Image (cartoon, rainbow, N blue to C red):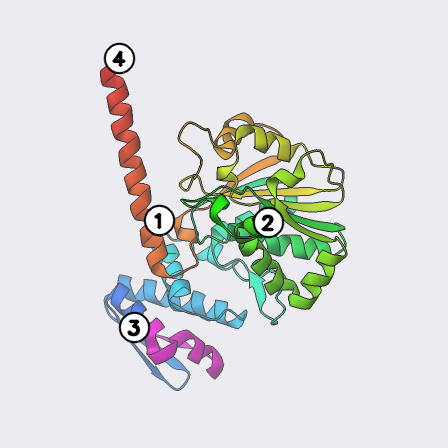
Amino acid sequence: MERHIEVEKMEVLINLFGSFDENIRLIEKEFDVAVINRGTEIKVGGEPEDVDKAIRVIQNLVGMAHKGTVLGEQEVRYVISQIKDDKDKELETLGTDCVCITSRGVPIRAKTLGQRDYINTIEKNSIVFGIGPAGTGKTYLAVAMAVKAFKNKEVNKIILTRPAVEAGESLGFLPGDMQDKVDPYLRPLYDALSDMLGGEAFHKNIERGLIEVAPLAYMRGRTLDDAFIILDEAQNTTPEQMKMFLTRMGFSSKIVVTGDITQIDLPSNKKSGLRDAEIVLKNVEGIEFMYLSEKDVVRHPLVQKIVKAYERKNIERERIAQSRNRSKK
């Protein structure tokens, strides 16, 4: 069986095929089809069911390219996985809304359906917990939403914070004063804000007190009005710290809490404030929990495989622990 697609714009066709036709080769390998282009026409040949799926993947990628998405391996693999799950209609909504524009002129958009839902959830709720593995854009998209609210004058201030918990290293051995010691923990937040606002605007707003990046301990005793507040790496808070942070919320403010419950660096005898919040706050009106998965990972494809491997290991550990508990009873 053979089907044809016409792509009107040559730049879209070039984007679709990728460097050295790597995007198309990936589609051919995944569905065992042959893809050939003649001018602006694309021909797909193979078994009817395989051709149909390949065509649907190409059509969705062309739609994304028209919206300005640069197509690479991650985008192609994601569309392939969604087509296999028959989510064509949902894919059409990807890339339609731009959260904000970076200082380099790059539009920030949801790259996965999970990210789209995450953005919409932040838009609609006062407190949102974004929980998921590394590389899903939890923090970056939360910062983008904060910048959007700040630029639209919906809030007067952006506050970013994280707990200064060591991941196998000791703060005491780092050089400098306390601020110097905690700066490495806050660097990802600095980088995200600088990327979106530009270095000069970022530093000016910090000097004016309109942007604050600080360790979680600095939040105690404050009431934060008219602010967009982000708590990053929340899996490393204690329940007491989480309660302290959430109760800092003032009028006309929004809070986003991000974390990965598979990367808890607390001592084994301490409970994670993020895990505790899942239980305590799950039925509180106005608070939403948004879960991202390995399908929403937008880093190198190997990151997705690493996340899956660790998830399988954690499930196995929990199964063994439950089995041991039952045998003791």
Residue 265 visible from this viewpoint: yes
Pinpoint residue 105: horizontal percent, then vertical percent. 61, 71
Mark 3 and mark 4 in contact (Cβ < 8 Å)? no
Q: Which mark is residue 329?
A: 4
Distance between the alpha carbons at the discs numbered 1 and 4: 33 Å
Mark 4 and mark 1 in contact (Cβ < 8 Å)? no
Name the residue tied to disc 1.
307
Residue at 26% across, 12% down:
329
Name the residue tied to disc 3.
25
Sequence-first tag of 2 and 4:
2
Q: Assess whether residue 4 is covered by the magenta stretch.
A: yes
Q: Is residue 230 left or right of residue 250?
A: left
Q: Amino acid at mark 4?
A: Lys
Looking at the rendered image, the disc whose residue lies closer to the viewer, 2 or 4, is 2
Distance between the alpha carbons at the discs numbered 2 and 1: 36 Å
Mark 1 and mark 2 in contact (Cβ < 8 Å)? no
Q: Is residue 113 left or right of residue 147?
A: left
Residue sitting at the far top? 329
Q: Amino acid at mark 2?
A: Asp
| The quarter of the displayed image where residue 108 is located | bottom right
Sequence-first tag of 3 and 1:
3
Q: Is residue 199 left or right of residue 50?
A: right
Q: Secondary structure at mark 2?
A: loop
| The quarter of the displayed image where residue 27 is located | bottom left
Sequence-first tag of 2 and 1:
2
Looking at the rendered image, the disc whose residue lies closer to the viewer, 4 or 3, is 4
Task: From this view, report whether residue 130 is shown above or below residue 268.
Answer: below
Sequence-first tag of 1 and 4:
1
Q: Secondary structure at mark 4?
A: loop
Magenta segment, which residues? 2-25
Looking at the rendered image, the disc whose residue lies closer to the viewer, 2 or 3, is 2
Name the residue tied to disc 2.
177
